[in-house]
Image (spheres, rainbow, N blue to C red):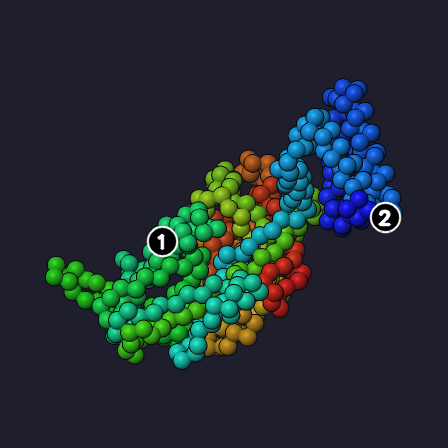
Amino acid sequence: MTNKKATRLQRKGAKEILRLGEKALSYRKDLLSQDEAEELNSSNLALAKVLKTKPILFEELDTSAKRVDQALQKSGGLYYHKKAWVENIEMLLVAAIVVIGIRSFFVQPFIIPTNSMFPSFFGMQPKLYEEGESVPTLIERGIDKIFLGASHYQVVSESEGPLYLKLHNGAPFKFVKGGFPNGRFFIFPTTLREYIFEIGGKDHKLLVPAEFDLDELMATKFGGTDDLRDLRIIVDQDEDFSGRERLKLSERVVGKGEVAIAFDILLGDALFVDRMSYNFITPKAGDPAVFRTGSIDEFNRKLNLLVRGIGEDKYYIKRLVGEPGDYLEMRVPESIITNGTDVRKGVPGILYRNGEPIQGNIAFRENNNRTDDLASNPNAKNVSGYPGYRTDGLLSNRKILKIPDKNSPGNSTGKKAFFAMGDNSTNSLDGRSWGFVPENEIIGRALFVYYPFTKRWGLSD
């Protein structure tokens, strides 16, 4: 065994011991006695010399490595013996500092939960499985989860009969708190939407994320419309003569064990937010901006603005449609009122900025074009996906809204303001309802959609 060469694994172990010896000597030199420092240094040098010889013999390597090991046990401190957790903590702290630094000053990840910016950005989207279409296998669900962030949902009938949706005080769902496995990161409780389907007199509960609108999906599947209100409501009288309301979703009898409804929820766009640029340039109308809502209510109260408020501190993404000093106005074409246009999701209008139809972004152009199309034909097909801006709140029809600058009369905040709207204003709680965004709350501009891997992957606009 004396002349046997050291194996690759043995050489690797000796190099690791030497690395720790040199690290301990470098970091603890001022804490060691002269004898301890000399012993550790000489053992390090001896092991380094053996590692440089050709060939490296096991016996010499083993002797030199054990000498370093003995010196380290005397004077290695936290770096030795078996103190790998110290290095792991150091590595994690450095990584955390780097991540926090990048997130604070350069780019911040953000996942879009709702469809208020659709079709520019997607929130959670459904993929509906039609009757007779096979649902994905576990392997297929795993692949969809990785590449699309998709989660699968289905209602399997435990009885036989027509399919109904129970109403909660006239609403198709109610909000509930959910824990494992539906909680955030499977652990922390989160708010969910609870839908109760009735089949053959038996209730079937379905829980989906609070931000996901299952109503429109059901309206499309069971009514060929985009509004559940178009479906027939069944009112049953209980023994106490109170009304029990249900929506009849399907005339078809669902058999026991059959899938009554199945769909996937695809994750909303995950994007990077550019936090750097707004330190050097001013936000502009047309920018898809991410901002915090924490101080927005207080800001608008100081402006004596009569709005409903937000009531929460979250990150929102909307498009800036007005800058400090701008005048905004929504004008509804007269024919919209009389030609039978569906106004249940708001009355379509043309958005004006400083007296002219707003320009500078595809969302501005397509939303205004959609309103023009509806003014000409209430049944016009929506090719672009943009639904047209809708009048509401601060932007009611023909109401001119001035965005305050920091020196505007009545602005005691000393801050500039911006006005933000969703590109999908039929499904957006935005500045029309809660007012202006103070400049200091704007975090940055949407920069890059990095997930999921779809055709929207890439630079944002």
Q: Quadrant of the C terminus?
A: bottom right
Q: Position of residue 377 (x, y in %)?
A: 48, 77
State the residue position of label 1. Answer: 175
Please tell me whether mark 1 sits on a helix, a strand or a loop.
strand
Q: Which mark is residue 55?
A: 2
Q: Residue at (19%, 62%) from the top-left corner?
A: 243
Which of 72/28 is in front? 72
Q: Residue at (72%, 30%) from the top-left corner?
A: 70
| 75 with respect to 392 (left or right) | right
Nearer the N terminus, badge 2 or badge 1?
A: 2
Which of 438/109 is in front? 109
In the picture as drawn, the residue positioned furthest to the left comes out as: 239
Separation of marks 2 and 1 at Cα, in angstroms = 72 Å
The reply to whether discs 2 and 1 touch (Cβ–Cβ < 8 Å) is: no
CA neighbours of label 1 inside 10 A, class few (<14), some (14 to 19), many (20+) = some
Query: Dividing the picture into quarters, in which one does residue 94 lie?
Result: top right
Residue type beneath disc 1: Phe
Please tell me whether mark 2 sits on a helix, a strand or a loop.
loop
Residue type beneath disc 2: Pro
Q: Residue at (33%, 74%) from the top-left corner?
A: 258
Q: Which mark is residue 45?
A: none
